[in-house]
């Protein structure tokens, strides 16, 4: 019934207030719809997924993928309608003491019947409509058609059900009853949840990235809405508490409080870093095949092994200097992994044996993942057909690694916050799932054997096997750079004991993980885990617990004693500082000193950056002012946030210091200079490989469309600045064949 205030207000004002009250009551649904809009319109990762979906419709004509995409987006649309209707009927039941399970009347005096009827319908058509408009604006007409189909289908279903009540069959089935519909949705959600938890790999692979995301959001919306309202329902009539829990209730806030209460009563931290142990198999661990040990007893030992094999290769080659390469791979998800691995593979293809001139590869986030795939592929294959090997490496790195981690995030990892049941695979976290997806992706491409396990093998064992199989060979040392959350400093995972006098601003992962006593190890980790130590992207992958109970895999220590490893990009997103410290430590030890009757070793840095929008001024020490600045709006409010974010990237200062450090090389030891486009001062003994601004749409994340992969491959093989840099680098080798400039793109 309208109040006296309603009668005195303009009709438009009353209607607007009703709609705002209704949106506030369904705030969680509205928030997920806003997230849906952001995913379709703003987020580069999902925009790339939609680009592939558009190709599936028009180019690949993949009917199965298209059908799953329609069903998943339709399920999310209908779930938005259901959640709003369910909330309104719960409000009505609390307000009136009863409700009609088939029809929503006026829920309360703040929300009228018309609004309660039409807002859920608007919610239902929004996801498809947003995809339709986005597809039209980007000229992705396949995606636009899909959005139109979903929008029309959703509206027809939720609108026509008011007429279905006249049909005798549907009336007998009670499909207009909200509780019957809720029961059906619950059953479907439980089935999807079962397969997503206990058959995660197969389910995520079958559904694909787009469908995984929207089926997951549908389950999240249903589970949170129904769970919170049904739990709080029991408290409505309790004095004091009941008044706080009467509908509408803040779903997200109460869910967070519930998770916090559960974590205080039970151990819900299942984010222990996986490891293998010398004497036991634990929840997140496996038995080591042999007693763990560092591949090299020290940095000095590694450098001597490297120098010996390198001088043998250059014994009969002309010249007085030998280049020693140090790779710094910038972070950036799968974009960084694909770019860094393909740059290194291209160099290997053009100069077979190039990897034996690379002393170490420091990587952060996706750069570390690419380095690890590259090192494992070098050890796994015989490198006879380098063209085919490069393609295999690209196929291994460029797979869908988003679906599995998204499935784990929205199902078992989220459920474990509320139901900490210590049963595998339910208690596995999404970090472990991501590692295992890398292992499967590598194994699906390369021949994995009991001796060569690919990314599921053990990190130190990789280098011991390499030395055992080819004593005169060399496998580049991968330095995986994470961040110690509680210490704010770099954590290095390396095949030798990390000492503070060599790396004063870093800690040894094995030391923090309680695996190292002096220079001896009691446990090791997989290659996939070593890569993830640097690639724990915020929220997508959780912080890894370093000190946890090995018997259960859960962290039970007091909060002030916990120690975690997080993404390396918080401190140095380039690995430039660690690369400089490494070169400096070797220089102090005389590694690059001139020696009688011997060629002099010269450090050459390869900077692999995948950020097309990176400011060139960080490489240009002659520039007095930055080439561009981008201050955020509302500076009074957001200036501290922007400052923290920009500083935490760690790129500019560390890269500039490394560039300057290399410029101090003795004049006689300058093997090459490079002057990237837009940079006034030349880089000395430093080579930059970067994606150009035209590739700015290649997304961050753990999924790449075929179009994005082809664009990066094209940058390496066509007549580009990157190709010119590759040509200049290969020319350092006296026995190298001339590099031909390709006339077109070579696609992977």
Image (spheres, rainbow, N blue to C red):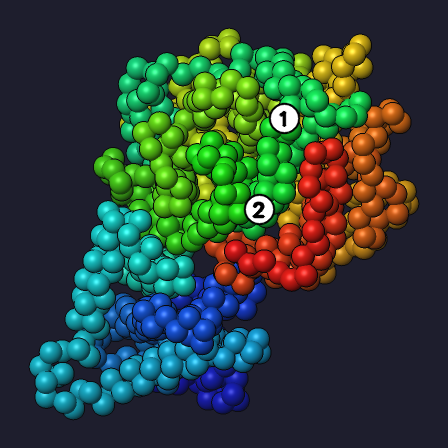
Residue at which label 2 appears: 342
- As drawn, 700 above or below 263: below
Residue at which label 1 appears: 359
**Residue positioned most to the front:** 316
Tag 1 secondary structure: strand
Residue at 28 percent across and 52 percent down: it is: 202
- Bin the neighbour count of mark 1 within 10 Å (Cα to Cα): few under 14, some 14-19, many 20 and up: many
Residue at 56 percent across and 65 percent down: it is: 42
Q: How many marks?
A: 2
- As drawn, 202 above or below 505: below
Q: Position of residue 462 (x, y in %)?
A: 45, 26
Tag 2 secondary structure: helix
- Could you tell whether 609 is left or right of 595 in the image? left
Label 2 close to label 1 by CB (< 8 Å): no
Question: Between 399 and 447, which is closer to the camera in this rendering?
Answer: 447
Residue at 65 percent across and 36 percent down: it is: 328
Q: Quadrant of residue 548?
A: top left
- Could you tell whether 374 is left or right of 670 in the image? left
Mark nearer the N terminus (2 vs 1): 2
- Could you tell whether 128 is left or right of 300 in the image? left
Q: Quarter of the image containing the N terminus?
A: bottom left
């Amino acid at each position: 019934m309208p109040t006296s205030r309603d009668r005195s207000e303009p009709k438009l004002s009353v209607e607007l207030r009703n709609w705002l009250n209704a949106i506030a009551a369904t705030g969680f649904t509205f928030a997920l719809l806003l997230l849906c809009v952001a995913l379709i319109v703003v987020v580069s990762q999902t925009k790339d997924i939609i680009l592939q979906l558009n190709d599936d419709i028009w180019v690949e004509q993949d009917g199965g993928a298209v059908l799953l995409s329609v069903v998943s987006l339709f399920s999310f649309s209908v779930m938005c309608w259901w959640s709003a209707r369910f909330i309104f009927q719960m409000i009505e039941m609390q307000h009136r003491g009863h409700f009609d399970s088939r029809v929503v009347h006026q829920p309360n005096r703040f929300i009228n019947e018309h609004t309660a009827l039409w807002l859920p319908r608007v919610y239902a058509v929004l996801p498809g409509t947003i995809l339709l408009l986005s597809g039209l604006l980007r000229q992705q007409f396949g995606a636009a058609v899909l959005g139109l189909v979903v929008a029309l289908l959703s509206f027809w279903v939720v609108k026509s059900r008011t007429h279905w009540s006249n049909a005798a069959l549907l009336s007998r089935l009670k499909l207009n009853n909200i509780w019957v519909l809720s029961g059906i949705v619950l059953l479907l959600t439980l089935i999807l949840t079962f397969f997503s938890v206990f058959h995660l790999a197969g389910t995520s692979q079958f559904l694909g990235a787009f469908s995984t995301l929207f089926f997951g959001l549908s389950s999240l919306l249903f589970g949170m809405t129904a769970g919170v309202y049904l739990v709080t329902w029991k408290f409505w009539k309790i004095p004091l508490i009941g008044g706080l829990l009467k509908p509408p209730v803040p779903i997200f806030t109460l869910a967070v409080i519930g998770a916090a209460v559960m974590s205080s009563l039970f151990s819900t931290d299942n984010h222990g870093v996986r490891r293998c142990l010398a004497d036991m198999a634990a929840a997140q661990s496996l038995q080591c095949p042999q007693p763990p040990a560092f591949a090299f007893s020290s940095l000095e030992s590694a450098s001597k092994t490297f120098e010996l094999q390198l001088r043998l290769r250059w014994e009969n080659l002309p010249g007085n200097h030998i280049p020693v390469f140090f790779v710094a791979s910038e972070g950036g998800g799968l974009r960084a992994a694909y770019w860094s691995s393909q740059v290194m593979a291209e160099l290997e293809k053009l100069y077979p044996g190039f990897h034996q001139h690379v002393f170490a590869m420091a990587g952060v986030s996706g750069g570390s993942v690419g380095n690890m795939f590259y090192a494992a592929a070098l050890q796994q294959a015989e490198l006879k057909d380098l063209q085919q090997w490069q393609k295999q490496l690209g196929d291994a790195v460029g797979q869908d690694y988003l679906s599995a981690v998204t499935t784990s995030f929205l199902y078992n990892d989220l459920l474990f916050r509320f139901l900490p049941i210590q049963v595998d695979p339910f208690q596995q976290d999404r970090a472990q799932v991501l590692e295992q997806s890398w292992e499967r992706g590598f194994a699906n491409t390369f021949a994995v054997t009991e001796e060569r396990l690919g990314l599921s093998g053990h990190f130190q064992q990789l280098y011991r096997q390499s030395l055992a199989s080819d004593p005169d060979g060399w496998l580049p040392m991968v330095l995986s750079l994470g961040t110690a959350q509680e210490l704010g400093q770099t954590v290095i995972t390396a095949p030798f004991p990390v000492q503070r006098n060599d790396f004063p601003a870093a800690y040894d992962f094995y030391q923090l993980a309680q695996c190292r006593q002096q220079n001896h190890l009691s446990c090791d980790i997989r290659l996939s885990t070593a890569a993830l130590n640097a690639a724990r992207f915020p929220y997508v992958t959780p912080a890894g617990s370093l000190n946890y109970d090995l018997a259960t895999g859960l962290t039970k220590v007091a909060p002030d004693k916990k120690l975690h490893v997080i993404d390396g990009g918080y401190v140095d997103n380039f690995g430039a500082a660690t690369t400089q410290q490494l070169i400096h430590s070797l220089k102090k030890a005389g590694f690059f000193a001139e020696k009688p009757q011997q060629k002099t070793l010269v450090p050459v840095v390869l900077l692999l950056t995948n950020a097309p929008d990176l400011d060139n001024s960080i490489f240009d020490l002659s520039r007095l002012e930055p080439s561009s600045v981008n201050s955020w709006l509302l500076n009074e409010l957001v200036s501290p946030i922007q400052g923290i974010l920009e500083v935490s990237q760690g790129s500019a200062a560390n890269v500039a210091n490394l560039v300057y450090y290399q410029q101090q090389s003795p004049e006689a030891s300058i093997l090459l200079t490079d002057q990237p486009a837009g940079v006034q001062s030349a880089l000395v003994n430093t080579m930059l490989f970067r994606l150009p601004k035209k590739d700015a749409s290649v997304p961050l994340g753990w999924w790449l469309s075929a179009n994005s992969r082809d664009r990066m491959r094209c940058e390496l093989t066509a007549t580009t600045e990157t190709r010119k840099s590759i040509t200049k680098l290969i020319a350092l080798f006296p026995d190298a064949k001339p590099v031909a400039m390709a006339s077109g793109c070579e696609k992977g």
